[in-house]
Image: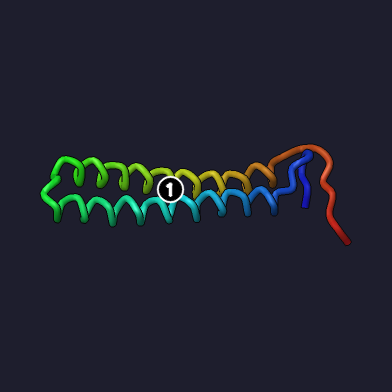
Amino acid sequence: MCTNGINTGQFGQMIDQIDDHMKLERRWAHTLAHQAEDAGFATVGEKLHAAQQLLDEVRATLADAKDALEDDADAASGVQVSLV
């Protein structure tokens, strides 16, 4: 369905794609952090764990954005077009 020129279904899917990408990057940051720590690079491991936490925040914000998309679409004034 389109609301005010935005296909909300596709928009939500694009947010999901970004989230999938962040999930993969988070996993890599986690893996590399442990590899660095195991090799004696404690500071590198610490920084990569910090990056992992920031990626967790990004994912949470993306979830909030997807919820907001639904709320904004419901509250939007204007033309709505649905396929029949």
Taking the spot 35% from the left edge, 56% from the top edge, the residue there is: 27
* Residue 54 to residue 28: above or below: above
Position in image of residue 47 (x %, y %): 23, 40
Name the quadrant of the C terminus. bottom right
Position in image of residue 28 (x %, y %): 35, 54
Position in image of residue 54 (x %, y %): 34, 42
Query: On the rendered structure, is 48 left or right of 81?
Result: left
Taking the spot 78% from the left edge, 39% from the top edge, the residue there is: 4
| Mark 1 crowd level (few <14, some 14–19, many ≥20, 10 Å Cα) | few
Q: Which residue lies furthest to the left in this view?
A: 40
Q: Which residue lies furthest to the front in this view?
A: 39
Q: Quadrant of residue 35?
A: bottom left
Query: On the rendered structure, is 48 left or right of 58?
Result: left
Colouring of the image:
rainbow
Taking the spot 81% from the left edge, 38% from the top edge, the residue there is: 78
Element type at marker 1?
A: helix
**Viewer-proximal residue among 52 and 67:** 52
**Viewer-proximal residue among 49 and 82:** 49
**Viewer-proximal residue among 6 and 43:** 43
Position in image of residue 22 (x %, y %): 45, 50
Q: Which amino acid does label 1 sit on?
A: Ala
Query: On the rendered structure, is 55 left or right of 50?
Result: right
Q: Which residue lies furthest to the right in this view?
A: 84
- Residue carrying label 1: 60
**Viewer-proximal residue among 10 and 27:** 27
Q: How many labels does the image show?
A: 1
Taking the spot 27% from the left edge, 52% from the top edge, the residue there is: 32
